[in-house]
Image (tube, rainbow, N blue to C red):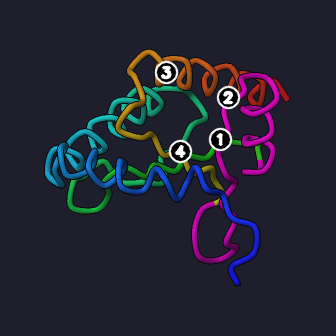
Amino acid sequence: YLGTRSYPSEMAIAMALDFHQAIGNKRKEDRLRFLKNYWMEKAASIPGVKLNTSLKPEFSCALGNISITNMKAADISSALATKYKIHVPAMTLEGHLPDGVRITPNVYTSSKDLDMLVMAIDDIAKTAKSK
């Protein structure tokens, strides 16, 4: 007995695999890396924002992590969720990684969506700077 399950998720597995195979691993990887670099390169120019993920292709693909001066990761995550309805997890591993938020676009994420993300990060960074 498996308990209560989400049948829509189970029913979508075959279509998700078909979609992945139609895109192909290389195209998917290229798209994810493009999206991560797209928003991170813009965020890098925002005062107070620190990139915790390398832009070098050999060190990262889709995942990006940033921190903002004078803000805890949980506060960045909360501000993005509350004001902009952007959900990002706070990553806090004291002594191992910088305190930051993980931002992970998906293949269907648009540049327009990422421009809104960067605008939100800029706004939050300005607010943090004024504290």
Distance from label 3 to label 4 (Cα)? 12 Å
Q: Disc 3 marks which amino acid?
A: Asp
Distance from label 3 to label 1 (Cα)? 20 Å
Give the crowd class for mark 2: few <14, some 14-19, many >=20 residues within 10 Å. many
Q: Is mark 2 on a helix, strand or loop?
A: helix
Q: Which mark is residue 113?
A: 3
Question: Going from the N terminus, do you reach mark 4 or mark 1 first?
Answer: 1
Question: Going from the N terminus, do you reach mark 3 or mark 1 first?
Answer: 1
Mark 4 or 1, which is nearer the eye? 4
* Camera-nearest residue between 3 and 121: 3
Q: Where is residue 27 in the image (x, y as percent from the top left)?
A: 16, 44
Mark 3 or 2, which is nearer the eye? 3
The quarter holding residue 121 reads: top right
Q: Disc 4 marks which amino acid?
A: Ile
* Camera-nearest residue between 26 and 40: 26
Quadrant holding the N terminus? bottom right
Q: Position of residue 14 (x, y in %)?
A: 36, 55
Question: Going from the N terminus, do you reach mark 2 or mark 1 first?
Answer: 1
Tell whether position 84 is magenta.
yes
Q: Residue 103 carries which label?
A: 4
Q: Position of residue 59 (x, y in %)?
A: 28, 62
Give the residue pinned by disc 1. Answer: 68
